[in-house]
Amino acid sequence: MITKQHLRQNLVTQRTRTISYAIRDVVVAAKLLEAKGRAITYLNIGDPLVYDFQTPPHIVDAFCEAARKGLNGYSASAGVPEFREAVVEKERKINQVKIVSNEVIATAGISEGIQMMMAALVHPGSEVLLPGPAYPPYIAFVRFFGGTPRTYHCIEEEGWRPDIEDLRAKINDKTAAIVLINPNNPTGALYDPKTVQSLIDLAGEHGIPLISDEVYDRITYGQKLTSTAALAKDVPVIGFNGLSKVYLVPGWRVGYMYFHHPNGELAELREHILKQARIRICCNAPAQYAAAAALRGPDKYLEDVVKRLRTRRDLCWKRLNEIEAISAAKPEGAFYIFPSIDLQNRWKNDEQFVMELLKKTGVLVVFGSGFDPVFGAGHFRLVFLAPPVKLESSLNAIKQFLGN
Ligand SMILES: Cc1ncc(COP(=O)(O)O)c(C=O)c1O
């Protein structure tokens, strides 16, 4: 029998040691407190089903029906044709993106798409430009594959709009891709068409592909999303999207990527993503059939979802800005708000602030530096998916904590 003493040292690679995911890492501390009897309010995770949002019944029925029909075998690696076709229809109707189903690949959530994309794009020493702050897996996977994640400045005072000049200054020969997340996690920013166009122009000028993550495409509070691929004429764009947020099925793990490349510039990249898709066999088959039904089915429920979220967004934005030590830009999409905190020499950094807030109040948010050590520092991310009464009591607790 092999005992621990007999195992060689340094069993775990440096590559995996670098991985962190602040959104779930903070839960470890919360669970320890919970085990000691502390009530915890989880405002850390972007899962709409944690509180009072529910998957629409017709979407649940579609999943049951697919399983009952016996659609439980492995599927084609790139995804079942029904799903890929439904993606084409949805992207055309909702985001004005024109693609054919051959350009769509089903993934186990966008998360798998990010992993596959970085595996294919990142050479040792490559740089990927990411919004600062960014959704953490982008940072983690670029690093995991031996690249350097470089975040570009986003202007907090202007609703976290990307700073095009900073982005331009960071482009060099090693730049493998420019990522935009629109609407953005963690800031809730929604980029206006002019900003999207500037990003496209910059990418086109330098011959760099754009990766546009639009998983919150239909959760916006004023303007509608301007999808990157809809605006980019001859600039190659890889779109990432999925069912987790808008269709309220994060646990199904269904997402997709598509390639917009009028001159076929991304064909080789797509082939190497497909190779990875084949080696992992396929993603959840019945969920793909159900996802096709969800994408094609009634979407009236979404009006109510966005309406309720808007009330919660307004509440959090107003109440947070009433606190002297806090200032927060108004989110225009998604369900996150990313306020800055005056640490007042009371806390060493945003992580310590979040941990003490948790200990003293039971309110769990995510520290901003988990989304970028530079541009996320001195901030925290609050998820406003919880019902207003829960948000009210959490905001009271935050106010009291900062006042003391
Ligand atoms: C911007 C962004 N992309 C991707 C994901 C993950 O999506 P999926 O559930 O499709 O893996 C999230 C989840 O919070 C997200 O905020």
Image (cartoon, rainbow, N blue to C red):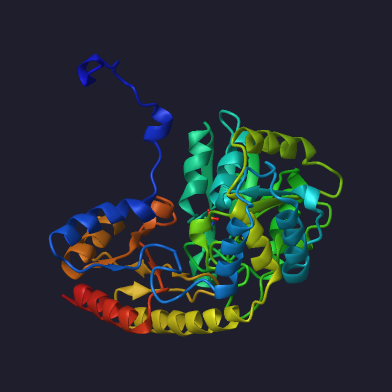
User: Residue 237: x and y, percent?
Assistant: 73, 51
Horizontal side, residue 141 vs residue 86: left or right: left
Horizontal side, residue 39 vs residue 242: left or right: left
Asked if residue 311 is positioned above or below residue 349 in the image, the reply reads below
Q: Residue furthest left?
A: 36
Asked if residue 330 is positioned above or below residue 338 in the image, the reply reads below
Residue, x 26% and y 74% (percent of image)?
398
Asked if residue 293 is positioned above or below residue 120 in the image, the reply reads below
Residue, x 24% and y 58% (percent of image)?
30
User: Residue 232: x and y, percent?
Assistant: 78, 58
Residue nearer the viewer, 121 or 101: 101
Asked if residue 393 is positioned above or below residue 294 in the image, the reply reads below
Residue nearer the viewer, 79 or 388: 79
Q: How many marks?
A: 0
Can residue 213 be seen here? The reply is no
User: Residue 308: x and y, percent?
Assistant: 48, 83
Can residue 263 be seen here? The reply is yes
